[in-house]
Image (cartoon, rainbow, N blue to C red):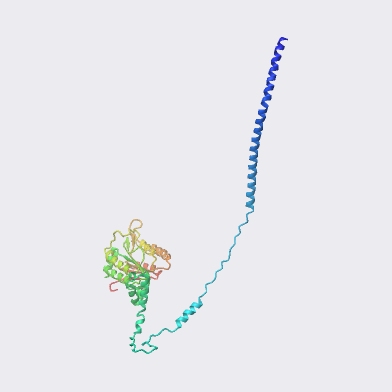
């Protein structure tokens, strides 16, 4: 009994204390729970609003894409008004051309009397009012276009040359008559050619004179250059030059100072060339000539493969066919040979026949 009495107050105290603590904690937990619920509601609402906005934006984008109009291609007709001939202006000019020109009178007349008489006017030679030579009119017009320095008296000689030589037609070189305005002179100056030229009675000095004579007779409308070669070669110019007085003077200087007569070629401007005539023809046709003069003994060698050998004529045939096909019109090749072999002459005549060229053997007296 005593134990029971002692324990009851203690138990009742403990129960009273736990109930009191729970009653005090309940308001704080309720406030915290309400706060958490509010925050969760705000977050969920925000997420919901954003999701709805994204869905609406996606629907709007898709709808706008499907509502775009289809591309329509239209071809509008271009209206062009054809040019009209100015008939009125032409008729006016024709009428003015038919009107009589004013005439010169020998005396002046006065409508009122004067105390003295006017002297007679001097007689004017009407022939002096006309051009003396149509060539002078052309010379003046060309001089105004290209300048006096580029014209010189080359045009005078060109228009006054005999046989149409000054117009780039009727050119004569070692007796070979031909035509052309874009001219390349090729000179084989190897030792064999030098010896055969001397043996034929035509030294290279004569070749120089004929070359300068040909160049001096070219009109300003022509273009020209020169190439000398053995195995190697050197050119007067890398492109065709207009036949002006300045370029003709430069050509004379080049012939006097650079001309090779020894049979060998060396120097700073010499191009090393193991392919001989093949490379020379390629360089020549690069400048698109319409006339080529070739001076040689018709015997050509190259160093393809290591040793010196004759260039096969099949190789030259294919090369010329390819080079001629690249030109607007085939270039005429005129060949002048010093003591050529009969087989070489026959082969070259077949090659030249395609370009309407000719083969001529040079001898003393020609």
Residue at the image point whose x is 37% and y is 74% from the top: 141
Q: Residue 124: percent from the left, percent from the top?
A: 34, 85
Q: Is residue 204 above or below residue 57?
A: below
- 16 or 41: which is nearer to us? 16
Residue sitting farthest toward the top: 2
Q: Residue 204: percent from the left, percent from the top?
A: 27, 68
Q: Is residue 203 visible?
A: no
Q: Is residue 12 visible?
A: yes
Which part of the image, by quadrant, shows the N terminus? top right
Residue sitting farthest toward the right: 1
- 167 or 153: which is nearer to us? 153
Residue 39 lies in quadrant: top right
Which part of the image, by quadrant, shows the C terminus? bottom left
- 14 or 174: which is nearer to us? 14
The answer to whether 16 appears left or right of 83 in the picture is right
Q: How many marks?
A: 0
Q: Residue 89: percent from the left, percent from the top?
A: 49, 77
- 288 or 13: which is nearer to us? 13
Q: Residue 337: percent from the left, percent from the top?
A: 32, 68
Residue 350 lies in quadrant: bottom left
Q: Is residue 126 above or below residue 287?
A: below
Residue sitting farthest toward the front: 115
């Amino acid at each position: 009994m005593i134990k029971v009495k002692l324990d009851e107050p203690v138990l009742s105290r403990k129960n009273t204390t736990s109930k009191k603590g729970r009653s005090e904690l309940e308001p704080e937990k309720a406030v915290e729970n309400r706060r958490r619920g509010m925050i969760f509601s705000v977050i969920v609402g925000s997420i919901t609003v954003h999701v709805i906005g994204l869905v609406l934006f996606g629907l709007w984008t898709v709808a706008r894409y499907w509502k775009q109009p289809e591309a329509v291609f239209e071809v509008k007709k271009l209206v062009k008004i054809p040019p009209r001939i100015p008939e009125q202006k032409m008729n006016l000019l024709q009428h003015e051309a038919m009107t009589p020109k004013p005439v010169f009178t020998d005396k002046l007349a006065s409508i009122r009397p004067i105390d003295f008489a006017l002297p007679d006017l001097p007689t004017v030679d009407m022939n002096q009012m006309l051009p003396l030579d149509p060539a002078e009119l052309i010379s003046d017009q060309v001089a105004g276009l290209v300048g006096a320095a580029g014209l010189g008296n080359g045009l005078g000689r060109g228009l006054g040359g005999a046989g149409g030589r000054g117009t780039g037609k009727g050119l004569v070189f070692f007796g070979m008559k031909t035509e052309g305005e874009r001219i390349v002179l090729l000179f084989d100056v190897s030792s064999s050619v030098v010896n055969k030229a001397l043996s034929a009675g035509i030294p290279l000095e004569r070749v120089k004179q004929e070359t300068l004579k040909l160049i001096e007779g070219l009109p300003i409308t022509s273009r020209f250059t020169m190439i000398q070669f053995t195995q190697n070669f050197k050119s007067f110019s890398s492109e065709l030059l207009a036949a002006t007085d300045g370029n003709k003077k430069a050509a004379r200087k080049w012939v006097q100072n650079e001309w090779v007569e020894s049979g060998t070629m060396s120097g700073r401007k010499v191009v090393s060339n193991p392919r001989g005539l093949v490379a020379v023809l390629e360089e020549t046709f690069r400048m698109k000539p319409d006339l080529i003069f070739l001076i040689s003994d018709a015997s050509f060698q190259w160093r393809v493969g290591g040793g010196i050998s004759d260039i096969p004529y099949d190789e030259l045939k294919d090369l010329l066919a390819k080079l001629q096909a690249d030109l607007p019109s085939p270039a005429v090749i005129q060949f002048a040979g010093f003591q050529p072999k009969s087989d070489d002459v026959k082969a070259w005549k077949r090659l030249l026949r395609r370009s309407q060229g000719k083969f001529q053997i040079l001898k003393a007296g020609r």
